[in-house]
């Protein structure tokens, strides 16, 4: 892990090196159904110069990393807060696999001019809402429960 921002985030080790990843090891297996990744926000509508553009959320299953399908894939993202919802599952290891980042020069929504990948914060939750997501009124009746607080252990990264 790079000492980017003096402990205030994660950055991949080398520019233009993708895929890059951040592995998170929870102290014990927990049931989760949402991951919130905080990256750099857009600077104006649709323009993002430093946030994560394309990434996959993966979990360790039978000793191998597996992407959570469509629910775990984010593509053409320009937002600063990325919320990935999926069916509840028990996990003790999670990976954010970064495939590309924004540079502010996009003319095409799938264009990647790779630079450094940066993650400011990760939240892992059991939200307790029906899956698939029904509507805002239903979700307002349920509350999110942080999983293991922010005490996760970063085991490996690239």
Image (spheres, rainbow, N blue to C red):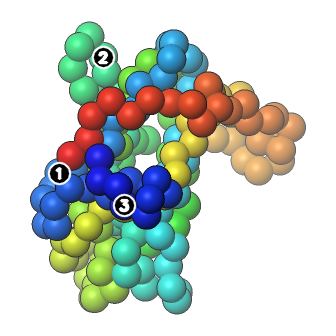
Q: In this view, does 144 lie above or below 26?
A: below
Along the viewing direction, whichever of 105 and 136 lies nearer the viewer: 105
Does residue 74 appear in this view?
A: no
Q: Is residue 30 above or below residue 51?
A: above
Foreground mark, 3 or 1?
3
At 30% from the left and 62% from the top, the residue drawn is: 117
At 16% from the left and 61% from the top, the residue drawn is: 14
**In whole angstroms, how far apart are the C-alphas of marks 1 and 2?**
20 Å
For the residue labelled by badge 1, is the local secondary structure a helix, a strand or a loop? Answer: loop
Q: Position of residue 133 (x, y in %)?
A: 63, 41
For the residue labelled by badge 3, is the local secondary structure a helix, a strand or a loop? Answer: helix
* Residue under numbered circle 3: 4
* Residue under numbered circle 2: 61
In this rendering, position of residue 145 left or right of residue 56? right
Q: Is residue 13 above or below residue 24?
A: below
Q: Count neighbours of disc 1 (C-alpha within 10 A) and say few if under 14, some if 14 to 19, many if 20 or more.
A: some
* Residue under numbered circle 1: 19
**In whole angstroms, how far apart are the C-alphas of marks 3 and 1?**
18 Å
């Amino acid at each position: 892990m790079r000492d980017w921002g003096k402990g205030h985030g994660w950055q991949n080790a080398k520019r233009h090196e993708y895929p890059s990843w951040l592995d998170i090891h929870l102290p014990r297996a927990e049931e989760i159904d949402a991951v919130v990744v905080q990256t750099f926000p857009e600077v104006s509508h649709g323009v993002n110069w430093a946030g994560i553009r394309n990434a996959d959320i993966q979990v360790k299953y039978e000793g191998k990393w597996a992407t959570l399908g469509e629910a775990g894939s984010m593509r053409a993202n320009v937002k600063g807060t990325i919320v990935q919802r999926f069916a509840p599952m028990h996990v003790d290891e999670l990976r954010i696999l970064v495939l590309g980042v924004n540079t502010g020069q996009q003319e095409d929504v799938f264009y990647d001019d790779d630079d450094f990948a940066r993650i400011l914060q990760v939240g892992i939750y059991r939200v307790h809402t029906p899956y698939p997501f029904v509507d805002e009124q239903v979700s307002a009746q349920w509350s999110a429960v942080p999983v293991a607080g922010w005490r996760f252990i970063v085991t490996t990264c690239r």
